[in-house]
Amino acid sequence: MDKNGEETRPTFDGMGLPPFPHLLEDAKKRFEELRNLECRKDDIILATYPKSGTHWVWEIVCMILKKKAEYMKETKEFLFLEAIPDISVVDNLASPRPLNTHVPYRWLPRQHIENGGKIVHVLRNPKDVAVSMYHHFNNGKMFEEPVDFKTFYEKIFMGPAPHMGGWFSYEKEFENAEATDTRGAIFTVHYESMKKNPIDETKRLAKFLNVDLTDEIIAEIVDKCSFKKLKEATEAMKDLPNFANRKDPGTVKRIMSRMYRKGEIGDWKNHFTVALNEHFDAFYKEEMKDSKLQVQFE
Ligand code: A3P
């Protein structure tokens, strides 16, 4: 966004793009590589709209798959399909691969969908998503100058080419996919449920992934993935492989501290004015009038 508040990011297929150099260079190529990715039957794709709690749920998924409450030494970015400079690096990884992406459903790897491969989807109150994204963009210096929340909300979150196509389009597409998912391949976890009831939600997730875990291990996973512990562990020991320019631990720490900001439900109340909130509610009502999505607005 420039200093007049105008959106300046390149777009592709209605999506404002994140500033990954290869995406900005040739977005169509990467999106097609992603959709044509060779998949294995036991791949798991964590598919989320950005800022919905992806890092958190990715770590939980990884611990479930390992059957151990042990942190991954890498951040989820090493399997972040649109962000890794060379997507073919995933070919060399051991199974099961916990891949992750923010691309809309229509761009997910086709073969994974044909295989009936498992998809874990995280749904979060879009008002909190907007606030989380606002801080992520401001702290990540994605604007020429810092912008206020209202400008971000109007120009980017609800703008003409919102980030990755926007929350509404992303979640409606997912809802349709879930409605026609006869093989039970899609599992949706609500950020708010995971926060309020992590033991039960983690058990549900393990069951979906067909992994048997004792109550002790589930409790340990939940504890190690609590906001404070996961943030500290990430900043202390994680590595960002596959990003040639991000080997320096200071950079990793800086990038990762943006991913673990507050970790709460309802921070939107500190950012939305009454007028913005009314605008959002009216827009939601109209835009989602045919939707049965059960967003947890509180
Ligand atoms: P906030 O900015 O509201 O704090 P993503 O991983 O998709 O980028 O989502 C980031 C959001 O998830 C951030 O929200 C972050 O703080 C929150 N988050 C990360 N780890 C969490 C955890 N262990 N528990 C709760 N929220 C977490």
Image (tube, rainbow, N blue to C red):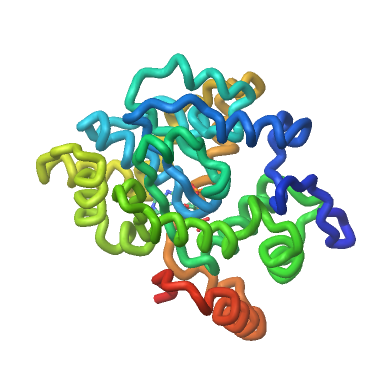
Res 251 seen here: no
In the rendered image of this protein, does residue 287 appear above or below residue 171? below
Residue farthest right in this picture: 4
Which of the 4 image quarters holds residue 248? top right
Residue 167 image offset from top left, x and y in percent: 58, 61
Q: Residue at x 72, y 61 (%)?
A: 156
Residue 210 image offset from top left, x and y in percent: 20, 39
In the depicted view, which residue is nearer to us: 156 or 70? 156
In the rendered image of this protein, does residue 4 appear above or below residue 55? below
Q: Residue at x 71, y 29 (%)?
A: 22
Residue 273 image offset from top left, x and y in percent: 63, 80
**Residue 284 appears left or right of 61:** right
**Residue 102 appears left or right of 208:** right
In the rendered image of this protein, does residue 31 appear above or below residue 201? above
In the depicted view, which residue is nearer to us: 129 or 250? 129
**Residue 116 appears left or right of 74:** left
Q: Quadrant of the N terminus?
A: bottom right
Res 79 seen here: yes
**Residue 60 appears left or right of 276:** left
Q: Quadrant of the C terminus?
A: bottom left
Which of the 4 image quarters holds residue 233? top left
Q: Residue at x 37, y 60 (%)?
A: 190
